[in-house]
Amino acid sequence: MSGANAPRQVGAGPQRRVLFGLLDAAGWGWAGVRAVAWTLVIILLLGYIPDRAYYLVVSPTVDLGLNLAPIVNICPAENEGLPCPAPRGALLPWKSASTPSLPGAGTGGALVQAGSRLYYVGGYADVAFDENAVVSDVAAAEIRADGLSAFSAVAPLPEPRARTAAAFFAGKAYIVGGTSVDQHAVTSVFVGAPDATGAITSWAVEPTLELPEPRTGAAIVTVSDGLILIGGDNNANVPQSTVWKAKLDDTGNLGAWAPLSELPASRVDAAAVLVGDAIWVWGGRDESGPTGIALRGDIAVPKSIAGGHSVATPSPEQTAQGDAAVGTIYRWRATEGDANLPSPRSEAALWSANGILYVAGGNTADGTQLTSMLWAAPSAAGGISSWANVPQSDLPTGEWRAGAHGTVIGASALLIGGLSASSTSEPATLVAGTSPKAPVFRLGILGATIPGLAISGEVGQQLGYLSAAGAWTLNFVLLLAAAVVYAQRERAAAWLRRKLGRKGSATY
């Protein structure tokens, strides 16, 4: 057979292996690895880097890479010594603000926000506890961008009240139950509606909302279709476990109170809030005194229905609620162990914000004055795991509070009214920031967080666009240069060798 007709030998010579010998340099595997690598490089240069360049201009911090498990954290000085990063729910250290002009002694009243005004309703006339020294005064403060204005007297209640439950719902403020000058607990409900200026200029008794039984010191929570009143004392000063709901009817008014599933234990002077599809009740006391047990009431929701030919598989929660009517409470559960308050207390300030429950100040069962602040963030699945505390968020030394009201206005938490450590009424309002700053620098696995320029407004946005466009353009030019060099890699290598050779020959 002639040499011209001899078959060509494919793959003659030794095959070159790459990637630690795992792949053939001329095979499809290595070609695929290079294709993926170049795709990632293109995404990095033309997508990720321009995106980071934009946020480097407009954001206070920028994440680079995958910042997993940061081991180095640096926070700004504005956090005033809070742990870094600040735990969720932690407040900046408390500071004294102006003294409010509250009705009477500033104790035993109720806070309710209606639009841009905060109302302090009723309460006791003097600091020495006298259940009959009840006032009908109402004071209001404007909610401004820079905080809360001073309180001033506005339209009073029809009758004196203290220890009421107050809520704003469907455009009206409701003052429910409470203590009068001659009864420990009453059944009446007062209603006030803001006028065209947004102010409540009058209050009226609402006969259709009269309670089934007298209650004082009850907790109230707003839900999507009405108000729910929880616990409280009856007229014989006995803590109760009743739960009633006033539901919104087709006319836009609340109907008569109807019973719901009762609490597993009585509760007075507690707080209540809706978190997801559950009502949380915490703080206050039961028939044995101050309690650290929090209660969770699960609300029945519409059940999901599978579409097409699939069979609906109910979730465990849907199975638990059974045939309970939507909007009712089908189950109450009590916390245990670490989920209980570590120090049950009476007359503590109780409030909630962003799904977090707070407890501050108050007294222990033996009368010890507490300045610590605790908080918990209930989850839909696990509930409360524990109560958190950092010393920096506690009340300042000597600023103990009892019977104060906690609320959140804008980016600030306020403690208003109550008694101070010197047993004086109307102590200075305490103010704490609710938004600690995020770390300005973090270093973790495969990434870091670095400070940004944080240029705000239209100027910052336009500069951010220019920064992103500049990064994209530069990276695109680099990609084009890399493509040219790769296409002419023999000539590029020869040129590089010449340059390196000339440099080396000039060196003696």
Image: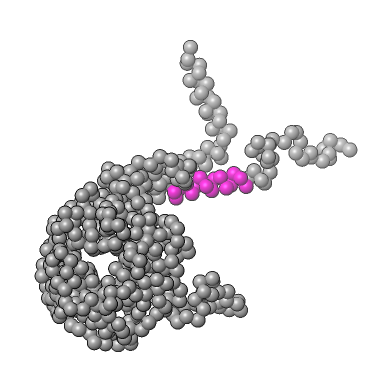
The answer to if 157 sits in the magenta stretch is no
The answer to if 34 sits in the magenta stretch is yes
Pick whichever, 158 or 337, lies toward us. Answer: 337
Pick whichever, 323 or 350, lies toward us. Answer: 350
The answer to whether 359 is drawn above or below residue 331 in the figure is: above
The image position of residue 501, as x and y in percent, is 52, 21
User: Residue at the top extreme?
Assistant: 508
Q: Residue at x 50, y 40 (%)?
A: 482
Q: Quadrant of residue 424?
A: bottom left
Residue 200 appearing in the image? no
Name the dominant secondary structure of the magenta segment. Answer: helix
Q: Residue at x 42, y 78 (%)?
A: 261
Q: Residue at x 38, y 55 (%)?
A: 342
Viewed as shown, does residue 353 lie left or right of 307?
left
Quarter holding the N terminus is top right
Viewed as shown, does residue 99 lie left or right of 280?
left
The image position of residue 271, as x and y in percent, is 31, 67
Q: Residue at x 16, y 57 (%)?
A: 423
Disc count in the image? 0
The image position of residue 138, as x and y in percent, is 14, 72
The image position of residue 409, as x and y in percent, is 24, 62
Magenta-highlighted residues: 32-48
Q: What color scheme is it?
A: one colour
The answer to whether 310 is drawn above or below residue 346 in the figure is: below
Pick whichever, 88 or 161, lies toward us. Answer: 161
Q: Quadrant of residue 170?
A: bottom left
Residue 49 appearing in the image? yes
Pick whichever, 24 or 171, lies toward us. Answer: 171
